[in-house]
Every structure is written in structure tokens, then in C-alpha cells.
Amino acid sequence: MNDDGRPSPEALLRQASQEGRGRLKIFLGAAPGVGKTYEMLSEGAERRRAGVDIVIGVVETHGRVETEALTRGHEIVPRKAIPYEGRTLDEMDLDAILERAPTLVLVDELAHTNAPGSRHPKRYQDVEELLAAGIDVYSTINIQHIESLNDVVASFTRVRVRETVPDSIVEAAEIEVVDIPPDELIERLKAGKVYLPQEATRALSHFFSKSNLSALRELALRRAAQAVDAQMLEHVRALGVGGTWAGGERIVVAISELPGALGLVRATKRIADAMHAPWTAVYIETPRAQTFGEAEHRQLAAVFNLATQLGGDVATVPATSVVDGLKTFTAEARATQLVVGKSARSRWFELRHGSVVDRIVRETPGIAVHVLPMEAGTAAPTGRKRTGDWGSKAGYAWTTAMVAGVTGVASALFHILNLGNVALLYLLPVMAAASLFGLRTGLFAGIASSIAYNFFFLPPTGTLTINNPENVISILVLLGIAFVTSQLTSRVRAQADIAAASARTNAALAGFLRQLTSLNEPVALARAICEEVGRLFDVRTVILVAEDPGLAVQAANGADYRLETMEMAAAQWAYDTGAPAGRGSGTLAASEWFFQPLRSGERTLAVLGLAREAGGDPVRSDQLPLLMSLVDQASLVLERARLEVEMRDVDAVRERDRLRAALLSSVSHDLRTPLTSVMAAAAELHRGVTPELIATIESEAARLNRFVGNLLDMARVEAGALRLRLEPTDLTDAVAGAVHDTKRVLEGHAIELDVAPNLPLVRVDPQLLHHCLLNLLDNAGRYADPGTPIIVRAEHRFGMLRLSVIDQGPGLPPGRENEVFETFRRLEGSDRAIGGTGLGLAIVKAFAEAMGMSVEASNREDLTGAQFSLCFPVALLVRDTDGANL
Amino acid sequence: MSVQTVLIVDDELHIRRLLKNTLERAGYGVEEAVDAREALRIAASRPLTAVLLDLGLPDRDGLELVPLLKKLGDPIILVVSAREATDQKVAALDLGAEDYVTKPFDTEELLARLRVALRGRGEATSRPTVLRAHGVEIDFEHRLVRRGDEEAHLTRKEFDVLSALAAHPGRVVTHQRILEAAWPTDHDRRIEYLRIVVRNLRQKLEGTGGVGTVIANELGIGYRLLVAA
């Protein structure tokens, strides 16, 4: 959304990701026979004449002469023969086309299903890959093959096609409607110019009625208009001209395991498209879900998949009733529109439960409720688990035993009981069975108790005949109690189960987040995600990230994962397309692993792979929403980590840039100044040699030399190329060397050495220490007032060995003493015209810290002047020289 | 006395020109070579007094030249190399080079090193019994050391270390050589012992005011007994 007229980032990203991709043009027809292929070939021929490199990937001419004539002159990539169950199927050779890399390829029948064993199950996936490779594609499709229109078409033509193409593909394409009036099409059909498969002729014959064709034509034209509209909107959004979601609508569709739910989802997609609104498919998980078998789970997964494919979000909400769940969810999701299906339930059911729809309308005020008829499923779910309903064998055994026990007790006490008390006694096993083992076992207890009561106690005893009509009531009461008790208990138990399930999910999510929030480092994060997801779903997990070339495993929840070529291909697919791949998905389903991309906005950060140890689908349909939640959280956390790393990099770059700028200005000044002096002095030499000139050249050259040395040192420090060679070093030695090497700079200053005898040796790199001292002495020589002495003092106090260089001069600005050690820092007021880059003291600090020492700068207490100290901690002192015979 | 010939091996024209001027002014004959091959050809064709050898040669490692030159008439070898290359310097000294100077160098210092090395060669046969350096007098025969008029009492180790340095007055002696000379039997030759001994020597011979006047510290390489060149 955007209200301020700025381009929406998502829209810009989407446009950017389209660049470099091929463009898809779809020739859309209302029905077979309108001439889509012919039109496509004609336009192809035109493009070829215009010099476009064009090949035919696959074109079905169905023996039509005009069409076949048009294929001539086009280069045709031979199809690939794929053996399947003893036959050979010809399929488009995707790899050959990619290899050939034309500018434009013609691919007929976008909705085609590939032969089993092909790379993708669907041809539109092949086309996706071609587009991703930057190849333009022309393709054809009939209107009823578009996913969201599939059941609209089926509703009035009574012909349902199984091969559909996701709306997203069509939405991204340029659409050209190939249109002929229905009358003309019927003429062509009669003239035998329309190809229909032999076996389908009869079934399709009523398809081509004039009313059907008119309706299809209208759909096709409307669809094309909608595509133009959508592309316009996208364009407008990218430009930031305006255009928002219509009033911030949010649509929620309630789905179920019934086959009609697919139709609901498609309808919702259409509504959402019309409103340009985001939408979510939610499944309310009621206690009924526990009785689901494999078929229901699969159906539910299919509905979830369809919703994802059509661009919707998915969610599962555990609740005791559908109405409660929807109430909660619509409130949380701030839904404005709710789509529900009205199932063809019996009047009896509605009398018993009340209309769900009525309650929804009543209890979700402020939400527009769309009630759509749910088409009864042709393939009604089978294989529902009944065992849970019927109760366990042990339950029946216990019940029988209890009834027998009560009968025994009642017989023994019959002489003191009347009939009514006996009937009451039988309530015990009935209530126990109903509450412990459920409805059916309870009813069984009621029946068994009735029979026992009747047989043993009701006169005439020993028969199942009932004389007194009052006693019929006793039996009915027993059965009624069984029913009511079991209903009550099962409801309580169901609520507890749901609360537990919901608590588990929430705990899982919370635990997952807790595990991740404490981590920042991408690899540790990936490992934590693997461990957590693996633990929650009891699966093996890997996380793959992009590496040059391809993908590489970043983390796994065990060392023994194996990813074969097929798995890597699926992972790569998931990474490239941002859509799930592998087992249980529509792409490369032969892979052992299921791969879910972790995405942030338009970019895929990583791919999460899951596999079940024993084989089998890694994630059950009812776990999919939890996985999606985890994936969303994981993506967010990974993105956060990535951004943090990026921020650090940016900071580092900025700091480096600052240093580089400072270095440049410093270098140009500090190299040029002595060079200028040298050049000027050298020029003067032509007129005559004087000792002053020579001295100038010598000292300026020495300055240059020192500066270059410092630059090299700093470069080594910054490049991290500082290799320490620590050895026991005597400070007297070190001072002697440094004083010797700075003799020239320190001319005019007396050096007072105050190095205590018998100081311990220190374990340092003598070279680095030497450079520290050179720079400190150099600095002192530069800032000390002329003629004043420079003191070098080494003292051992409080366990700390301290080597100081003390000058007598202006000193340092109070309170900012230690800032002098920052790179390229020359403190105001201490700068003046004295040469130096501010590098020297930074080198002192860097070298000292590399050796484990610290540096200090302060002003003198006795006189004005600065004092710089190198502090050697105890750890650096060498103590084991005592006792050697020296 | 015949003219002493010095071979300059360096691939940089400016360095060769500078060295040539300096050496010729000091009275030496000069030969020049730009790479190892030329250097070896010259060394094989005429007697050389000394070679100023740059270690960074275009055709092969300058270190390899040291033993080859030693075989070809055993000239004095002064290594000329950059500041950081302490390992190379030690290696060159171990291979038999007499001394080194560090680029950028002071020409006076270079000449002094060369003179010291030449003198050392001449005196190799007859070692002087008394050595004088900056107010310090070392009497090897009587194992006596005097600073000014005062006798400095050296321990045995201190005297051994001083002797090792004095064996090549004015020339650098590597840590390893000194350790070998002063701790001949000790398997536990440790540089910290040497550091302590040198520090004690400095106290006895230099005093606090004159640190570095008698013994020069060559970073990462060794020590040098300073004598008037």
C-alpha cells in the first residue's frame, strides 16, 4: 500500500525481477478450434521476417493443412521421446531449447501435462524455466484451463478439464484473445475443421452449443481485459502514481476437507482479484479433524496448495466449533469479507445444529459474508478413520464386566432392593462406560444394562419380555443417560484436546522464536532453525544457501544427510522460483526431500529441506500451516541477521572511506612538503653547495623515509598482516636502538634516560616495540620546545612495567589526551605547522595493542609537556631468568 | 697497494650510480652488475675485494649468490636490503656475508661498514690483544676490561659475550653466533640470558648516560660492538 504517491517497493522489485526474464505472450481462445495455433504461427512468421531468432518448441497442427503450412520455414527443435509404460510419448525437449537459446520459442498448449518422468509435471513449468533463461515464449491456452475459471466453465458447460494453469502465469503474460464469433466456430466444427480427440467427441458435442460458446467468449474477453487492468495497476504502482487496495479489503475464506473447498478457493481468488484485496484460506480445526484418514488429509493439503498457488495465505485455527474459530480468526486478521460454502446438508442436520451460516452472519458483525454453494464432491473422501468412534475392545470388555458385576451385586441384594433401585444401580456402568470410552461404548453399556435388567430383574424374569409399560421408561432412561453423558464427556475431552493442540502450536512457535532471537550469526541461526524444525516435525532438515555456483549446505540437524542430483535440482528450483519443490509438491516430486524457500520480499534467502527418515511425506497437511508460520519466522530472523551483517559492512566501509579520505589528504600534504624542500634544495645546489642545503635534503629525506615506513606499518596493521615474533626483550636494548635511530630528529634535545636497573625482560616483538619507540621519540622531538630535554623513563611499579617518553612543550588539550591515538588525529592547538600525519601515534597504539600492551597519554604534572606511556601488563614480563649463571 | 675493486649488484640504476660515485670517491674500483648472472660472470673473471649485494634481484634470489660468490674468490659481502627483511639478513650472515646495510642507507655508514669489514679481513690472522672502543679498553690476554681509568668487573659470561662481539669489531654478530660462543656446551641457549648479559654489560661499560655507545642493538639480528671506523 502506499498513500503518499511514492513507488511501492514491492512493485518496483517485481518489475526489476522481470528484467532479464523472457516475456510470455499467450494466445487465449474461448474454445478449441478458434485458431490460436494458427494465429501464433502467423505472428511467429512475421517476427521471423523481422529477423527474430525463432524456433518451434512444440506445435500441434492436428493435421490441419493451413496450420501445417505455417510451420514450414520455422526451425523446429525435435521432440524428445519418453518411454512410458511400453509406449513412447513425444514431449517438448526443454534442454535442447535451452541449449539452442533462441530469442523466441513457440510452445503450443500451455496447459499440457507432461509425460511422467519429465522434469516438470506441467508444460507451463517448462515455459517458466524458458522465461527464466531469458527466452521469450509464445503459447496458447483455452479459457477453461485457467485455474480460477476452471469451475466457472465447468458449471455451465458440464465439462471439467483436469489440466489447469495457475492464474499467476497468465497474469504475468501479455494476452492476445483469438476471437471468432460462435456461429463461425460452429460452422468450422461442422466442416470438420476443428480437431477433437476421437473419444471426446461425444462428450464435447454439447460443449459447442451457441450459448456455451457465447459465455466462454465473454469470459475470455473479460479475462483479457482484467489482465490489461492488472498490468496497468502494477505499472501505476511502480510509478507511484497512486492506486491502492480498494479500501483495504481483506478476504478470508473458510475451507474444509470437502472437495467443494477447491471451488471456494477459486471463487475467493476471483473476488480478491476484482477487489485487488489480499486473501487468506483458513481451516478451522475442530475435534472432527481427529477422525480424518489419509484421504481427508490429502484433500486438505490440495486445498492449501491451491490457495498458495493462487497467491493466498493459509492458516489453521484449532477451535471447538467452526463458528468460534472463524470469529477469532476474522477478528485477528481484520478481515472485511468472509467467504463460506453452504454445504448441501440435510434439513435434519440443520435442525439439530442450527445453520452454521446463520450463526456466522450473526456473530461476525461488520464483516460481509459471501455464502457460496458448495458443489458436492464427485470424489467424496473415503477411508475415514472409524476406529476412534467405535471405541476400543478393552472398553467393551470393561463395560461387559461392569454390567455383569452390577447384575451380580443387584442379584445378591435383590431381597432388600426394589426394582427402581436396581435400575439406578445400572446407571453406574452406563455413566462409567460413556465417560471413559465414548459414545458407542456408552450406548453399548446402556443396551447391555437394559437387557440384563430386563432379563434378570423385570418380571417375568428369565425372558426379554416387558409386562409393565413403566419399565420401558427405565430402559429408555438408561439409554438416554448413556447418550448424554458420552456427549458431555467427549465435548469436554475435545476442548481439552484442542486447548492442548493450540498450546502446543503456540509453545512451538514461541520456543522457536526464543531459540532464534538470541542468535545473530547467520550460520548459527541456520543451525538453530534446522534443529528446531527437525525436532518439531521429527524430520531431517538442511538449510541451503546460494554459493557460486549453485547451492551449498549451510547447516543440517544431523551429519548423515544425503542430497543426490534430484534433490539438488529440487532445491535449486525452490531457490530460483521461490516456490516449494520436491516431495509432496508439484515440482520434481520424485525427490526424497521437500524444499521450502525462505523468502523475504522478493528475494530467496535460503532453502529449507525436510525429509522423513522412513521415506513418506515430510510434512502432514495439518502441519503445513505450522511449518509456514515457522518458515515465515525463520525468514524474518534470517533477513534480520543478513541486514545486520550488511549494516556492519556498511559501517566498516564508511569508516574505511573516512580513513581513506584522511589518508589521501594527509599523504598529499606530508609527502609533498618534504619532497618540495628536497627539490628546491637540489635546485639550489646548482648554484653552489652549502652545508645548509645538504642538511635540508638529508633531514627532509629522512622525514620522507619515516613517513613511508609509517604508511607501510599502518597498511600492515589495517590489512591484518601483522605477524608477531615475540621474544624476551630488554628495555635498555630497545631504548638504545630507538635513541640511536632518532638521533637526527632529536638534534637539539638532550635525551635523559631513566631506565631502572634490573627491570624484568618483556616478551614483545622487538621490531614493533622499536617502531613504537621511534614514533614516540619522533613525536616528542616534534612537539618539544627547542633545547628542552626529552626523558625516556622505564619504571616497574605495582606489577606494571611502564615505558614513558616525556617532553617539555605545549602538552595536550586537557580531557582529550587519549584522542591523540586515533588515526589521522592531530589535536587542535598541538598541530601548528609541524609535520606529521597523525599516523605515528595510531601506529604506536595499534602495535602496542597487538602485543597485549596498552598506551596512555597525559600531561606532565611537574612542567608543561606531554607524557606518552607504553604499559606492559604482568603477563608480558619474563620472570624465569633468575638463577641462571650469568 | 693495488686498487680494491667493489662489485655493485643491484637492478636499480640510481642506486648503482649513487654507490658508484660514493665508492669511487672513496678510492675503490667499481664494477656493476644488474642481475645474478652478470654478477657471477664478473666475479669469475676478475678478483673482487667486496660485493655490495642487493637481495632482490630480477633473475634469482640474492641469497643463493652468497655461497657462490664465496667460492669465486671469497670477496667481502655486504648485503643491501629493505628494513623488514630480518630473516633474509640473518640467513645471509649465516651463509657467510660479512655485514649488511639497510635501505635507505647513509653512504657514510656504508663506507664505514665496508672499511670495518676490510680491516677485519686483514686482521683475521693476528688478533689484537687489546681493543679500544668508546672509552672502553678490552684486554683479551688478561681478561681485563677498563672503562676510562676504572676497571670494570665482568662476570665470566659477560666477558665471553663481549669477546664474541669483539672477535668482529664493528661488525654485526648474530644472536645465534654469540650464544654459541658464550654458552658452548649449554643446550639451553636462551636469548633471554643473552639479553640480561648485554644489559649488565651496558651498565658496566656504557653507564646510564651513554646507552648504545659501545654495543649497538641490531633489531632481530644481533649486536654490534661499536669501534671507531
Image: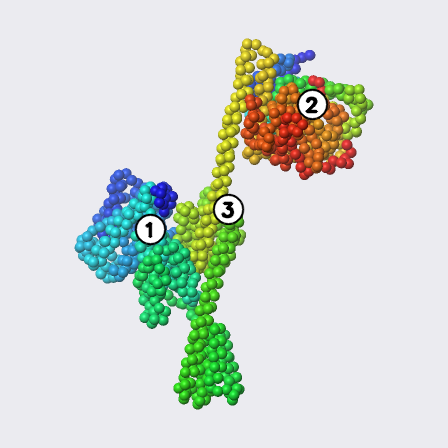
Q: Chain of mark 3?
A: A
Side (left or right) of A593 relative to B119: left
> Does mark 3 fall on the same chain as mark 1?
yes
Whether B175 is drawn above or below B47: the answer is: below
- Residue nearer the viewer, A664 or A389: A664
* Front disc: 2 or 1: 1
Question: Type of residue at label 3?
Answer: Pro
Residue farthest toward the top in the current orientation of the protein = A687
Side (left or right) of A707 relative to A163: right
Q: Could you tell me which quadrant the C terminus of chain A lies in?
A: top right
What residue does disc 1 label? Answer: A247
Mark 2 burial class by Cα count in 10 Å: few <14, some 14-19, many 20+: many
Of helix, strand and loop, which one carries label 2? loop
Side (left or right) of B90 relative to A292: right
Residue A674 position by quadrant: top right
Q: Chain of mark 2?
A: B
Q: CA distance from mark 2 to mark 1?
A: 92 Å
Of helix, strand and loop, which one carries label 3? helix
Whether A261 is drawn above or below A636: the answer is: below
User: Where's residue A297, x and y in %?
Assistant: 41, 62
- Residue nearer the viewer, A597 or B102: A597
Q: Residue at x 54, y 17 (%)?
A: A677
> Does mark 3 fall on the same chain as mark 2?
no
Q: Are marks 1 and 3 in contact (CB under 8 Å)?
A: no
What residue does disc 3 label? Answer: A522
Mark 1 and mark 3 lie on one chain; the one further toward the N terminus is: 1
What residue does disc 2 label? Answer: B171
User: Where's residue A218, x and y in %?
Assistant: 23, 53
Whether A431 is drawn above or below A886: the answer is: below
Residue A83 position by quadrant: bottom left
* Front disc: 2 or 3: 3
